[in-house]
Image (spheres, coloured by chain):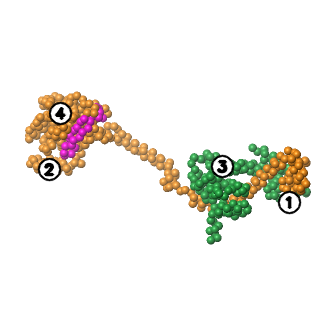
Amino acid sequence: MRDEQLLEAIERYLNGEMNADERREFEQLRMENAEVDQRVNEHQQFVGVLKQYGERVELEKRLNAIHQEIDVHAIEEEVAIRPSWIVTLWREHHSKISVAASIAIFAVLATLFVTGKMDNNSSYKELKGEVDRLGNKTNTLSKTVNDLKNVNRVFPQEQSRGTGFAITSNGLIATAYHVVEKADSVFVQNAAGRVYKTKVLYMDRKNDVAILKISDTTFTGLGAIPYTFKKASSDLAENVFTLGYPQDQPEYGAGSVTALNGLNSDSIDYQVSIPVNAGASGAPLLDSRGDVIGIVKAKETHMEGVHFALKSNYLLAAVDSLSADTSVSTPVLNTKNTLTGLSRQQQVKKLQKYVFMVKVY
Amino acid sequence: MNKEFKTSTPTDSEIVFGILNNSESAIKRLYVAYFPMVLQLIINNNGSADDAKDIYQEAIIVLYNKIKKGEFELHSKLKTFLYSVCRRLWLKRLSQMNRYSGDLHDFQDFLPVEEEVEDQAERNMQFSKMQSALGMLGEPCKTIIEDFYIHNRSMQEICESFGYTNADNAKTQKYKCLQRLKKLFFQQK
């Protein structure tokens, strides 16, 4: 009973219900008895929390009532940041888009694989002249030439064309095998526009080399060949140049030997950095001294400015085998180089006379 | 004209004095004025409209208590204070849910309000202890305690509504109830 009475006294004290005497007496007790003092503080604190809790519950009720009256949905519509349509599209459909993309990539790879486009060999594109592209031009030109020269021969449009160059002054001409491989008849045309009929004497598919002989009756010989043929291999970075007939006019191109092996490390070829065009197949490749070091043959389609030329010793081997394969006696090659020491312009000017456009019908 | 005045944003001093005078309309105007701002913050940062309601009411309570205690200084704006508290509370909630991406999309300036938010969390914990203690107390103790201490009803009224034959019996009952409530409250960790 003692404790209950104490609590009642505490409550009356805290609520200010005591009269002045009681109050003085209780405060005296509180000062003398630390336990009582502690009980007062404890009770005050606990009842405080209880009252605050009650107030909180009340306040929450009021706030909930206010909240009921707000049209939350309308405000939500207003304040939400709308992502752009493409973001929405991606969020909603990203799995489908990913699947579609994977299928597309797979399909492309599969197609490339099946069609053989991923095969290395297919990148090897022969430098055969494309007649479609040049058709009209050539027609006009051959007519003009005929008119000018009063030659009563009419040349139909050739099937393909390339370049060739003289090996001997009596009309042996070297070119690339792929230029003449499907030839019915082969003609050569010099820088002045004269056309001569030729005969294919020798063809080597493996090394891509062919030798023609001018068989035209109007042909009277070429005069001394100004260049010689290099037997040894050239050095890397050797300055080289070429002269060919990708179009109706001879085109000069210069560059250097960039590799001593050709495509896929093929040792019969040089790799050169000359911007040659289709139709330059069979053109001579010369070093700065004026030695023929190779025959231009093909370009790597995947890389710009990378071309290949057959090394000159394979041309010499072809010339050597001429006598064995054919009835022609072994030709005597020029050994006196008259290009050495000349300026490049002079070299090209002299060379022009011995480089021919090869027209295949 | 009248309607327009009602929906317009109330001034800060109107609200503060309204709350100090226990004005019901002051709280309502405050609540309506800034709810859209908080809804915008929450729903654009991985929250729902219900999250916004919880967070906003919590912040209103913090502000209300601060004003009631006379601690709110009018040099900081009510709007900024509410936004800052909501922002802090929502960051806390997000990291509790492990949904915080480290980047909050902000719409307003904000103040450091860590202290207020921590005090509030402390009080909330005491209140939830009190709530469960009262829940475990059972009737008629719960109603007696609530009537006497929260609703400030006199022992005479309580005595009558519970049909006690005399006030002393009621007092004894109330004493026992309070002792049990204290025990239940302090037992909880």
The reply to whether dot 1 and dot 2 touch (C-beta < 8 Å) is no
**Residue occupying image coordinates x 84% and y 47%:** A37
**What kind of element bears circle 2?**
helix
Q: Mark 3 lies on which chain?
A: B
Tell me the kind of residue under disc 2. Lys
Residue situated in front as seen by the camera: A249 or A96: A249
Task: From the viewer's perspective, tell me whether residue A336 is left or right of residue A100.
Answer: left
Colour of chain A in the rendered structure image: orange
Judging by the rendered image, the residue that carries numbered circle 2 is A143
Q: In this view, does B142 lie above or below A169?
A: below
Nearer the observer: mark 1 or 3; the answer is: 3
Residue A256 colored in magenta in the image = yes
Task: From the viewer's perspective, tell me whether residue A270 is left or right of residue B155.
Answer: left
Judging by the rendered image, the residue that carries numbered circle 3 is B114
The residue segment tinted magenta is A239-263
Q: Position of residue A245 (x, y in %)?
A: 20, 43
Tell me the kind of residue under disc 3. Glu
Q: Mark 4 lies on which chain?
A: A
**What kind of element bears circle 1?**
helix
